[in-house]
Amino acid sequence: MSRSGPDAVISLRGAQLSYGSRVVWRGLDLEVRPGEFLAVLGPNGSGKTSFVRALLGRQPLSAGTLTVLGGPAREAGRHLGYVPQQAELSAQAMLRARDLVRFGIDGHRFGPRLRTGAVRRRVDEILASVGASAYADVPLGMLSGGERQRVRIGQALATDPRVLLCDEPLLSLDLNHQRAVTELVDARRRSHGTSVVFVTHEINPVLGLVDRVLYLAPGGHRVGTPDEVLTSESLSELYGTRVDVLRVQGRVVVVGAPDGPAAPPHHTHQLVLEPEEVRR
Amino acid sequence: MTLAEGVWHQIFSFENYGELLALVRNSLVAGAALGLVGGLAGVFVIMRDLPFAVHGISELSFAGASAALLLGVNIVGGSIVGSLLAAGAIGVMGARARDRNSAIGILMPFGLGLGVLFLALYKGRAANKFGLLTGQIVAVDTPQMAWLLSTSAVVLVALAVIWRPLTFASADPDVAAARGVPVRGLSFVFMIVLGLAVALSVQVVGALLVLTLVVTPAAAAARITASPVLLPLLSVVFAVVSIEGGILLALGSSIPISPYVTTVSFTIYVLCRVAGAYRTRRWGDRRTVPQPA
């Protein structure tokens, strides 16, 4: 856990983000090292999305500093691969999988497209590397959520980024696809030393891969290994109420978040509740 | 002659066709340019969900054109000014879809009202007035032609330059913004380009029916292809066929051109929709093949 300054790919010091008088998080010190897998956890409204926007350079901090790859966040550009939260698909539905990946390579350039052969081969390579070749020419609107997410990851990796930023990439995926997506991300991390910032409300699908956790909560935040952060003591303190964290068959189960326990609306076979799920 | 025959003869008449054809040469050339511009702009209208904006801009364009008619200045110029004012206002007022639609709903009746006012004050030929709303074949004289073609050229060059980042920003705005695409700037630039395209279309199909050139062809093409090359290509082909087909069918009749154009355009859409349903089923069949996990 050495916090070596110069080679950190992401560095936050005393970072604070507020909207008007409402402080979302403050005093955030964090350095993400090359090849590190950081999970960002927390209930809705705790500032996970703001954290993502800050890293993308689309949300200025209200105090403190943030550098990505040693410079301002908005200059990270092609070195930061971004898998956005699945949004409604109206406009993308008419594009094919290969078009989305192609955007990742040269979609930001003005003027007519040149060197099509080379770009096309690169797109084919990327689609193959994420196992999406079979549906390269299918419109995105006709793909399943898991298939789309593979294409998304392909798009994010198209520029060989040094950081991969995934915003709730497992949302509404079944267990098989969750595993497939996390394996893709992890394989990339191992082969290329790509740092991964993985925003999620479900820690269990990535529990075995995570180096450190950033837990954002209304009452503050914690940074540390899953064993340090995901404890009854630390979450009780974050939530300001008694929260029990249990380990069942290698999984983390959080019980007793503010609104009291309830049956989770899905994944009942999993017996896993995150505070956020309990509230729903 | 029975009533039905009389009506039929009013709608379709091909007497002296060769001589008439020579009269509308300008319109046929203008039509080709409009088809090109409308078909290409339409691709983004569909992608960015802007059909209502097109309608709103065309009403303001109508107001501009009728003001020009009243003042005795260039009608294409007036139409372009009205369009640009509307497109600029929509671009500034409504970045988000919800705000945008309200902004358009507020602008549109105002524009139409202004247009009606100017036309009521105008004492010239009634056909000129009607033509602005429902289109006319021989509207295009030589000086207007120069306006039409040069504005088309501006639109085409602008689209060629911004096509790629605009597609990225339209389909995938979050990632595009993260990659440094000026999403908001492009959105504004496209509204201006769209304003010009609408002003052009108003000249031939009239303000009420612009959607038939700027939305229907692209929507039809999107039904049968997802290829980023075929989509604009087919959209242009459909738009050109609609407008030129409409002009040629309308030639001998006393009826405005727009019903012919809208009917051709709508027929193409219906055919594409049927073909598209077949295509979807075909993909659907393929999708049931189990995928490797």
Image: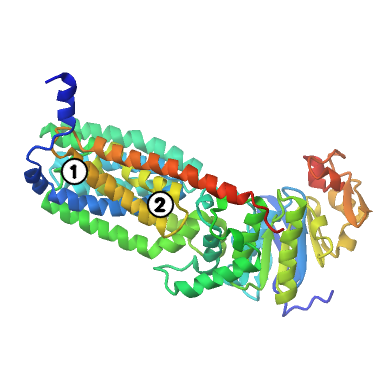
Residue A279 image-quadrant placement:
top right
Answer with left or right where residue B264 lies relative to residue A159. Answer: left
Chain of the residue under label 1: B
Q: Earlier in the sequence, mark 2 or mark 1?
A: 2
Q: Position of residue A50 (x, y in %)?
A: 66, 56
Q: Is A21 above or below relative to A39? A: above
Q: Which residue lies at the image location 88% right of the left edge and 54% below the top edge?
A: A252
Task: Judge whether residue B79 can be spotted in this image.
Answer: no
Q: Is B262 above or below relative to A76? A: above
Q: Position of residue A245 (x, y in %)?
A: 91, 51
Q: Which mark is residue A233?
A: none
Tell me the kind of residue under disc 1.
Leu
Q: Position of residue A74 (x, y in %)?
A: 58, 67
- Looking at the image, the residue that sits furthest to the bottom is A6
Residue, disc 2: B43
Answer with left or right where residue B219 lies relative to residue B260. Answer: right
What is the C-alpha distance between the residues marked 2 and 1? Answer: 26 Å
Q: Position of residue B223 (x, y in %)?
A: 45, 46
Q: Which residue lies at the image location 33% right of the left edge and 35% below the top edge?
A: B110
State which quarter of the image contains the N terminus of chain A. bottom right
Q: Which mark is residue B248?
A: 1
Task: Judge whether residue A187 can be spotted in this image.
Answer: yes
